[in-house]
Amino acid sequence: MEFAGSHILSVDQFERPDVERIFEVADRMEPYAHRRRITRVLEGAILGSMFFEPSTRTRVSFGSAFNLLGGEVRETTGFEQSAIAKGESLYDTARVLSGYSDVIAMRHPTPGSVAEFAGASRVPVINGGDGSNEHPSQALLDLYTIRSELATRGRSIEQLRIAMVGDLRFGRTVHSLSKLLALFPGVQVVLISPRELRMPEGIVEHLRASGHSVLESEELESSIAHVDIVYSTRIQEERFQSQEEADLYRGRFRLNQSIYTANCEPNTVIMHPLPRDSRDNARELDDDLNDNPNLAIFRQADNGVLVRMALFTLVLDVVDQVDREARDVNWYTARRF
C-alpha cells in the first residue's frame, strides 16, 4: 500500500510486504524510543488524540510516539467533554478537528465509527479501536512482539503455533491479529474460549481459507501444551448486556505459574494486550507469573511505541528524514525531553 497520507483503519489494508515495511521502520525507531537518540522530524506537527472510550496504554503510547518524533499532542477524552455530547455528528467533528491536526488517532465504542470519521477527515486517521471490530495498531505491535520473541529462539512467524484464550467474540485485538497471521504460511491456531465467546465464524473461515490449522476448544490446560505463544485476553465486560452476564465468564480461564509449568513447553511466550484483570474473581494471568522470563506483556506494551512511531513516520512521509534530523544524547539529557 501507499502509506503517505493514508488512513490506517483495518488490517485488511495490509499485504505481507506492508507489514514487513512497518516492522523495518519500527526497528529503526528503537534508539529514539529508548532515548539514545533524539529526532525532531515532526516538530510543529500536531496529533489530534481523540479517545471516546477508556484507554491508558493505547492513548499514552500514541502520544508518546508522537512526542518522541518531536510533535505535539492535543487530547480529547470521553464523550462528556466533547461537542458530540451536544449532538454534533462525527462528520462535523471530523471536518473541524482535522483542521487543527496533521494526523488523528481515534478510539470509539461503535464498530465502523472510526472509518465513518475518516471519511470526513482532511488528514490521516489511525484507528485506535472501534468497539469490538478492530484494533490495527495493537495487532501490529502484537505481531511485532511475536516476531521479536521468536527471533531470540531462532524462529520466525512462519510455522507459528499460537493459542488465543478468553473472550474471542468481543476481543478486537484477536480479530485483527488473526487477520495478520493469515498473511504468513503454516500457522497453527488454537482458539480457547467458552462456546458463547467463540471467535467470529468469518475470522475462523478466513484463517482456514488461508491454509492454516484452526482448533477450537473449551479446555485450557490440554490446549496450551504444544504452542509457541499463549495470547490471553480479558473478558470484555463493557461489551456485554449486563455486568451479571460478564461475570458468568470472568475467571473461566486462569493461567498461573503452576498451570504453565505443568502444561506449557519451557519457552512458551505469554502475551496479553492489557489491561489484565487483576481482581480476585478474574486473574486471567496471575501475578505469580510476573517473574517468569517468558512473560512478554510489558515488552509487548513497550513495542507499541516503536510500531506507532513507525506508523506516524510512514503516514506523514518522513521516514527518510528521521536520521538526518537526529542527534545522539546521553541518557540523562534524553530524559529531560
Image (cartoon, rainbow, N blue to C red):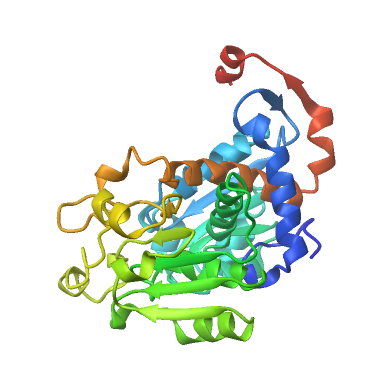
Image quarter in which the C terminus is found: top right
User: Eyeballing the image, is 68 above or below 27?
Assistant: above
x then y, percent, for residue 175: 50, 71
Q: How far from the left and from the top, in percent, is residue 164? A: 42, 67
Please give left or right for residue 53 compared with residue 31 in the image. Answer: left
Q: Is residue 133 visible?
A: no
Depth check: give the residue in front, 309 or 190: 190
Instruction: Name the residue located 15 percent from the left edge and 58 percent from the top edge.
Output: 281
Left or right: residue 193 versus residue 189 is left
x and y percent of residue 76 in the render? 47, 49
User: In this orientation, does residue 211 appear?
Assistant: yes
Residue 273: x percent and y percent? 43, 55
Q: Quadrant of residue 17?
A: bottom right
Who's the residue at 76% across and 20% down the image? 327
Is residue 172 toward the left or the right of residue 276 in the image?
Answer: right
Horizontal relation, residue 322 to residue 275: left or right: right
Q: Is residue 189 above or below residue 62?
A: below
Q: Answer above or below: position of 59 versus 198.
A: above
Q: Nearer the viewer, residue 324 or 67?
A: 324
